[in-house]
Amino acid sequence: MPFNEKDGVLTTDEAIEYLKISKPTYLKYIREGRIKAIKAGNGWRVLHSELIRFLKGKGRQMRQEESS
């Protein structure tokens, strides 16, 4: 998803609060590639639009298509 000027950048703590998941789960999803984030300093940064994409289940759908 291309960067949008209005698209906010969230820290790890902000993202896990938004998603209502634990930090270990969030980090696992990043490692698995289910959430696309970048390492910045001691934490991760993720676009708000990426979290919306993740919540809509599009990441899981893409993975299923790749394995077919």
Image (cartoon, rainbow, N blue to C red):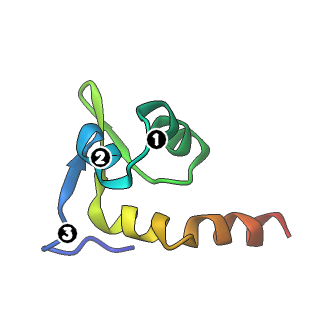
Image coords of residue 48 (percent x, y): 28, 63
Cα distance between the residues tagged 2 and 3: 17 Å
Circles 3, 1 touching at the beta carbon (< 8 Å): no
Distance in Å between CA atoms under marks 3 and 1: 20 Å
- For marks 2 and 3, give the one nearer the viewer: 2
Which residue type does callout 3 highlight?
Asp
Specify the quadrant of the image occupied by residue 3.
Answer: bottom left
Q: Which mark is residue 17?
A: 2
Residue 43 image offset from top left, x and y in percent: 29, 31
Question: Which label sits in the foreground, 2 or 1?
Answer: 2
With 40 as the anchor, is 20 left or right in this view? Answer: right
Q: Residue pushed farthest top?
A: 42
Please state if 13 lies on the left or on the right of 67 as rendered. Answer: left
SS for tag 1?
helix
**Residue 52 left/right relative to 12:** right
- Residue in the image at 55% along x and 37% along y: 28
x%, y% of residue 37? 39, 48
> What residue does disc 3 label?
7
Q: Which residue is mark 1?
A: 26
Looking at marks 2 and 3 on the same chain, the residue that comes earlier in the sequence is marked by 3
